[in-house]
Image (cartoon, rainbow, N blue to C red):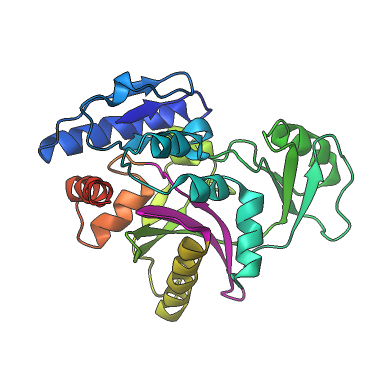
Amino acid sequence: MLKGGNSHERPVSLESAEGVSRALNDAGYNVKEYDIVEPLITQKMLENVDLVFPVLHGGFGENGKLQEALESMNINFVGSDSKASGIIIDKIKTKKIFVENQIPTARYAILKDGDKTFPSELKLPVVVKAPNEGSTFGISIVKEMSQWETALQNGSGDVSGLILVEEFIEGYELTVGILDGKVLPIVHIIPPCDFYDFDAKYTHQNGETVYNCPPEPEIIPEAAQKEIQTFALRAYKATGARDMARVDVLLCKNTMQPYFLELNSIPGFTSSSLLPKAANAAGIPYIQLCGTLAQLAARR
């Protein structure tokens, strides 16, 4: 199992890896763990290894480089291949695939780092994002022009040299887990603040986040839930995702129109993370979930 990494999401990876390691050991697997501090995989790490379970969030672990290295060594591994990983980590590439496949997504504009011009095709409020970051790093909501330059600075420095600007959607925050091409129950995320930021996910200084899985049908009708699951599976297939993914969605409160935001090819994997929550709601406990993913990789 590969864990850690050198991205902003290293602490999340270490926490996820602790849970996955325990689950795989309990399921009877012999687990060797490596903390990947540098973006490098060696043959020595892979001696007597049947498969690799990457639990690396962001950066080298999720951008396709790790997957490319493992493919070159003919090592089976859990998760999407190098091509799909390189697409999914990039919010701009993913948005373009959504548009090409008639998957509803928020209107957006792309800026180059250093460009401070507000996009003429959008109006306030907007969301500014670093295209290749995860765990809401580099994301800001801009409600007034006085916040614009600070948001651009927060979203700058991405490896792409670009900044993604999206229209702000007032809606329910949802996520859809997919396991081996099968859609799991939707998780409705109710954060204590404006949006599901790093604090709402991990530190809870502003209060606890509530998770409803599946959502209450009085709030999100079953017909809307089924439509969202159908589009989520289309997004999974269109991006070439494999084994698992988590698809993030906003559902407009007024119109019940879903807007698809992004996918995660290696989502958070503590026993209380979103994909494991959804799997558990589908009758797949955490140990079985981790074992299933290992088996999928082993059978390739």
Quadrant where the image shows the N terminus: top left
Look at the image and tell me whether residue 230 can be seen: yes
**Picture quarter containing residue 122?**
bottom right
In the rendered picture of this protein, how many numbered marks are placed on residues? 0
Q: Is residue 250 magenta?
A: yes
Q: Name the residue nearer the viewer: 181 or 111.
A: 181
| Residue 151 in the image, given as x and y percentages of width and height | 75, 38
In the rendered structure, does residue 297 fall within the stretch colored magenta? no
- Picture coordinates of residue 58, whole percent (x, y): 51, 36
**What residue is drawn where x is 40% and y is 78%?**
222
Q: Quadrant of residue 145?
A: top right
> Residue 104: x, y in percent?
61, 69
Can residue 204 be seen in the rendering of this structure?
A: no
Task: Measuring from the top left, give residue 186's x and y in whole percent.
Answer: 39, 63
Left of 206 or right of it: where is 119? right
Q: Which residues are magenta?
A: 239-268
The residue sitting at 89% across, 45% down in the picture is: 117
Q: Is residue 196 found left or right of 11 in the rendered image? A: right
Which image quadrant for residue 120? bottom right
The one nearer the camera, 280 or 3, is: 3
